[in-house]
Amino acid sequence: MQDSEAQDSLATLLRGLRAACPAVSPSGRADWPGAEGAYNDLAAAGGLAGADCEVSNGYLLLEQLVTAYRSSPGADFYVETGTDGSYSGCAP
């Protein structure tokens, strides 16, 4: 079982991803203040040290979404799948 700090960090990450990903938001729109708040909390704590590959990729995704939003707040975001880039490399 994970320690309390790791569980809290994971919960914060999931809250941030839920806020940033409109597909899982009941309103169908991203909650950018919520996503930024979760990212800021995680970044202030030094990220997610010791996290497994999938959790680390989730943090990278949140970081990149918040960074993109901050640089272009009115932009539309689209999901594209692929096998290369920052999120590849998790062993099955």
Image (cartoon, rainbow, N blue to C red):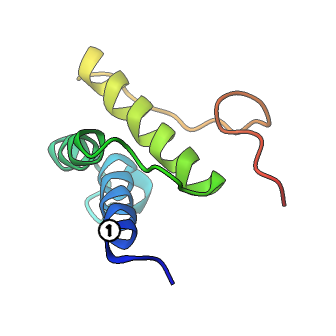
Quarter-wise, where is residue 23 in the image?
bottom left
The residue sitting at 70% across, 27% down in the picture is 85
Q: Position of residue 41 (x, y in %)?
A: 21, 47
In the image, residue 28 above or below residue 26? above
In front of the other: 41 or 2: 2
Q: Which residue is at the far bottom?
A: 1
Q: Which residue is at the far top?
A: 71
Q: Which residue is at the far right?
A: 92
The residue sitting at 80% across, 37% down in the picture is 83
Q: Is residue 14 visible?
A: yes
The residue sitting at 34% across, 46% down in the picture is 20
Q: How many marks?
A: 1
Q: Position of residue 1 (x, y in %)?
A: 51, 84
In the image, residue 85 above or below residue 40? above
Left or right of 76, for residue 61: right
Q: Quadrant of the C terminus?
A: bottom right
In the image, residue 7 above or below residue 39? below
Q: Position of residue 58 (x, y in %)?
A: 51, 49
Quarter-wise, where is residue 18 in the image?
bottom left
Left or right of 51, for residue 86: right
In the image, residue 14 above or below residue 21? below
Q: Secondary structure at mark 1?
A: helix
Q: Which residue corresponds to mark 1? A: 5
Left or right of 13, for residue 71: left
In front of the other: 1 or 84: 1
Q: Is residue 72 visible?
A: no
The 10 Å Cα crowd at callout 1, few under 14, some 14 to 19, many 20 or more, is few
> Mark 1 is on which residue type?
Glu
In front of the other: 34 or 30: 34
